Image: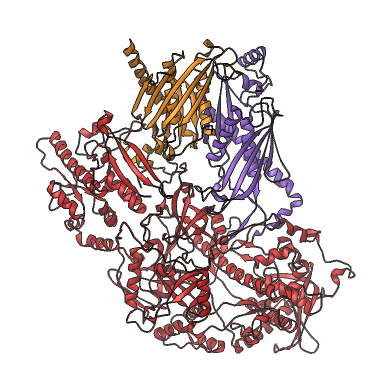
Amino acid sequence: MPREAEISLNEREFIKQALQEQIRLDNRAFDAFRKLELTFGEEYGVADVQLGKTRVIARISIDVTTPLPERKFDGVFQIFTEFSPMASPAFEVGRPTDAEVILSRILEKAIRRSNALDTESLCIIAGLKCFALRADVHIIDHDGGLIDASCIAVMAALQHFRRPDVLVEGERATILSVREREPIPLSILHQPLCVTFSYFAEGEIFLVDANLAEEQVRNAEVIVTMNRHGEVCQIAKYGGVTVNPLAMLQCTNVALQKVKEMSKFIQQKLDEDAKRRDAGGLMAELSAENAR
Amino acid sequence: MEYFSLKRSNAADRGQANLSSKIYVRSTKSGKVQKIVRELYLRQDIPCSSNLCRACLDIAPTDYSKKVAPFVLSDTPAGSKDYPNGQYLVPDTNAFLTGMDLFEVETAFHDVIVLQTVLEEVKNRSLPLYHRLIALTKNEGKRFYVFFNEFRQETHVPRDAGETINDRNDRAVRKAVEWYNHHITEAIAARSKKQKRIPTVIMITDDRDNLRKAEKEKVPAVTLTGYVNGLENADELLDMMSSAQEQREVRSKKTEVFYPDHYSISKMMTGVKAGTMHQGIFNVSTYNYLEGSVHVPAFDKSLLILGRENSNRAVSGDVVVLEVLPRDQWKAPSTKILEEETLNKNDNAEAEDGENVISEKERKALQEEVKRVHGQTAEGKPQPTARIVGIAKRNWRQYVGHIDRDSVRSSSKTSRQQQTVFLVPMDKRIPKIRIRTRQAGELLGQRILATIDSWDKDSRYPVGHFVRSLGELESKGAETEALLLEYDVQYKPFPKTVLDCLPAEGHDWIVPASLENPGWKGRRDLRDLLVCSIDPVGCVDIDDALHAQKLPNGNFAVGVHIADVSHFVKPNNAMDKEASQRGTTVYLVDKRIDMLPMLLGTDLCSLKPYVERYAFSVLWEITPDADIVSSEFTKSVIRSREAFSYEQAQIRIDDKSQQDDLTNGMRTLLMLSKKLKQKRMDAGALNLASPEVKVQTESETSDPVDVQTKKLLDTNSLVEEFMLLANISVAARNYEAFPQTALLRRHAAPPKTNFEELTNQLKIKRNLELKTDSSKALADSLDTCVDSGNPFFNTLVRIMATRCMMSAEYFCAGTQAYPEFTHYGLASEIYTHFTSPIRRYADLEAHRQLAAAIEYEQLDPSLQSKAKLEAVCKNINVRHRNAQNAGRASIEYYVGQALKGKDIQEDGFIMKIFSNGFVVFVPRFGIESLIRLRDLATPEPEADFDPENYILNVKGDVKRRVELFEKVQVRITDEVEVSTGKRKVRLTLV
Amino acid sequence: MPLDTSTYSLALLRLDGRRWNELRRIHAQISTQAAADGSSYLEMGNTKILVSVTGPAEGRQSGQRGGSGGQAKVEVEINFAGFSGMERRRRGGGDKRSKEMEHCVKSAFEGVLLLHLFPHSTITLNIHIISQDGSLLAACINASTLALIDAGIPMTDYLVACTAASSASSTAADNASADDPLLDLNTLEEQELPFLTVGTLGDSDQVAVCVMETRVRMERLEGMLAVGIEGCKRMRGILDGVVKGYGKRFG
């Protein structure tokens, strides 16, 4: 089994020592994210996130299927993750590592279980037809912070995506092409985003957005998912060194602030993209609903 | 889901005295059987919550913040004859189910102990009643305490082998009562030796068996009636109870009452062909949800469908197949208001196995009707009655509504459990819809869009699913979107393909300067004419402009210039398709939903002042007596000199100092229009009235400020007359050119039966005669319908007469014979729509046909195909009607908003009388509202209804006689409905 | 329709008759299987779990004997009995949810066990879930602690876990008593309320494991954590009693 290139003992000690002296190797503050970049594709629902050297692409696609028999009134929404071997030698196709399982579980809990997407609105005819929405997350480059980056990518892609409109007449449903009817955005109920905290020095020091080297050295991680309304969607601390409960609560405060910043950033990028698509302000001409 | 609950103690083998477990067997929908085991921790620290008891204070539980819940039950409870020392009441399940109204009375029923066993059973039987009971326990004045008897060791009752669940629960109640009595006696003994006043804890039950057992076990028990009899205001309370008991539903375990099966399609087809069955569109009455009507060609009068069984799962709007019932089962249309919301409010949303599709209450409500109908004459004449045997085509659409709060089991927002709730559609004619959702908590208080998926024969209500939430109830955005959806108005942005059909120059497009330009080909240069437009204030999509000029021969040259939309919208391109689907622009109070993109509608096509625009002109030579000498049609270029509002134009015309040519031209137009109108009236055109009001909004927030009745100026009529004239001229020209495919508009003469009721009403109430033989006769007799003491009476009659008319419709010339072309209301032989192509698709088609008729261009093949045109007509007829309804609904909403928080007295008129209510029309606000007897007083007063004379005599304290056409004073307030949290305008008689 | 958690505020009683801060009945045994190096059986209410420990021993796969870095490797496998849930159906092992639980138990114990004492070896935990009624992860952790103690593998302290929920429904803004955090949830409560699983090391307040999967207002976290940690302390007392009871028998 190929392994992540292990970090040398010297390096390990160096990072630890530096942190004790309140210094991160890339000179970031302890509560600072790396530079976040977000671009959207030509197509609706493609988001490319770069967090420092980490790069993740999420793509949303849609299809029509039969709903699951036990969920007749729901559409289908699935998140698939793919760790490409080109991102890191530790990744192998077809054999999910623990990291991959945890990533997809966290995305599942953060986005799907917290009900960020209203799947009931994807139902076309109960029990017969529904939309199946699929989010594919591709890890292109791995330098730590995969969970945070993937979550941003999926949420941004979901907000960017437009699904075709559908016309239901009795038991017949017609999917209207983009040319026939302006496609419609998904119904997003809230926007959960993940912030991963890494603990060092037996739980005394914590950082946000650790890079790969820091991740290898850390003693424990806490993944907090929140939305900007101050709701915690998910917390995961799977073992590692113990942490003071008050410090955990402090994490949620930091996370809230980060999540607010990131939400704003995503919104800003979405607006920019909308503007770019609306070259020459022609979209306003197409609005049918106008003030009298 | 049904529970055969058995609570079996396995305390012994666990070795722990305080542990029991509850084992359920549950059968799921799919028929699987699941066994559910639950733990039950029995304890001794559940307080009795009586302020008499000291011992329980010590064991009272504390919460996280170390607070102790205060004790609920009074230390000096009220007594009665039999129990002078005061009493605590322990009602059983049925007592709550039948007498919830009684328990809610402020003056009686204090200090009640609600047992857990009872609470659970109530929840099982009726969720709405459960919610009411929970509300009672939170009402401090009522002193209701929930005692968790199943968790208290002394009162926990294991189920014996072979014991039915009901017997066990009764035993649990008796046991709890017994314990309570014992406990209270002990508590008082511990307090002081002297106190003699020991309250008794009494079980309230109507179950005879239970009473007998209670007597044997020496448990104090009394029937509900027995208890109420001992109270001071017994009579009043007993009244409430009798009605409550009547309403109680008999719930049998196994019922076989399903809806009848629908016939197979082939059977229906043969039946319809053979004439034994009929096909038509099912319409449900807005006042009585159990009554519907279907118009079929074979009968003059609509077929009547009464009751759930006969309507057999049809939803208003469906195309149904019916069988007429034997003549002895024919019935008269109901004179009673029946609302689903009130009649079935205690139904559970979760479907049950033994559900009766027809509730006992509904059956009763209808039976009363039938009794009344027998021995009726005049109005109550039985009408052909039918039952629905199959559905030819479902016309289910998406319905807007809100979630019934009482049907929600758990309103927690985090719970992801799927539950079934009721969606109450905005449209009263649509039945409640069962919706299965995981987000019930979040959907409460929201406007919801949902669809119906199916309606199986064993379910009383249709089943559907949630589509999306439109936003909070009452918020402007949600309500506007709701009404657009409800009237199927396409308000989404135009697709991008439409962009390609717009002129590349965008807003910079101008009429080409060079006359050589192809745009000028076949166009007449009318730029030097003094043209102006007259429209409502703030109009930006100006369709029409006019001019008049005196000719040397004493006649007048008059022109109507219409925006040349067909120049920009070519047949069959993306924009044309979109426009033909939309059919019309929809005007709401604060919004306009355009048929064409703004670039065209409000700029390039719009006949704005001071700029050159393409137009399609109708030019006449008219004599001073308003006779038409000649008419001519041409494409043209005009330059409007001014865009007036009706008011401005009126002021300008009235201002004698203005003597410029433009103003004089308008004066000429006004003079001619008056003559034209007179001619129309002489020919028998109807002057109808509709209850129109105008809402004034604040420009920034578009919050309603004031409601005004529309004022009509002479200039309104000026524009109207010339538009009518243009339309008639174009109709004739198009028909001449295309006798098979001209797109025309007709207004059929209403069948005589439509006026029967109104004629009868006028005759009885006012001794007036309404002649309906021809439009002329009707117009004349409407003029005679005056009431000297009541100037509004005439308008009221006109409004009511309008409702008896057929609706006007677009049609294709080849589908009707020439005599059928007539426009009844306008008394014109032929008519079409030509003058508003920016906002009506029919006009655009007429433009194209006229352009071909004058050989300006080739006619597109789509306009030569009768089949295609018929499809277009069908669509725009629907769109037109929807647009009007949406506009009205928007005004209604804004009027409601304007009345928010107000308390006004206004004049109203009685428009319709039912046996349990009446409809009042308030002209000041254009609102028409139902006042039910139960709105007049609680409890609902009795009333005598005299259908022959249209009189309702309300008895009791209200004591009042209400008759048709009566002028009444009403008080208009708004109130928040408890169940929905929605605000409603409420009218009461003063 | 049985009552649901919304009735808690009526008399401060939960669906099964407990108060907010009461644990369910806990029954535990160790050394239940002679064949294993260590084993335990734990009941938390109707949640029933059997754990057996093998090792420290040589790893099963020849290629990867023991852990790296001079430490023993911890392997965890969780099996759900087909009859453990309400629906009788066979759950294929290796779905993501049980993998996540395995990962959680594994990394939690990696921090507690003194693994450097057993280089190049593997410690395998086999967790069998016999009956599920809420607080599953917590029960797995508690049972594993007992089995590892039974196996005699040195660890710094008891790793104990508990669930805690917030009973406040977000719509009901009525009385304050509805805000009580609840301790040790059963399935019904887990389905209706936001809850978290918290694991602490021994008597300390230090959090070793914290997993929350439901959406909740951040202000509610503090109460939930506090109650959960309090429950862990009580849980440690109970487990300690079980271990000492066995000790006495052999002493």
Which picture quadrant has residue C189?
Answer: top left
Which picture quadrant has residue A157?
Answer: top right
**Residue B814 appears left or right of B377:** right
Can residue B901 be seen by looking at this rendering?
no
Give A223 or B262, whichever is nearer the viewer.
B262
Q: Please tell me the colour of chain B.
A: red
Task: Give the chain letter for orange.
Answer: C
Report the quarter where the C terminus of chain B lies.
bottom left
| Image position of B384 with respect to A265: above or below | below
Give B201 or B260, whichever is nearer the viewer.
B260
Residue at (63%, 62%) from the top-left corner?
A: B592
Give C96 or C83, whichever is nearer the viewer.
C83
Q: Where is residue B311 in the image (x, y as percent from the top left)?
A: 44, 69
Q: Where is residue C89 in the image (x, y as percent from the top left)?
A: 46, 39
**Residue B265 appears left or right of B171:** right
What is the basis of the colouring in this image? by chain
Task: Give the chain letter for purple.
Answer: A
**Residue A120 appears left or right of B160:** right
| Image position of B649 with respect to B481: above or below | below
Can residue B696 be seen by looking at this rendering?
yes
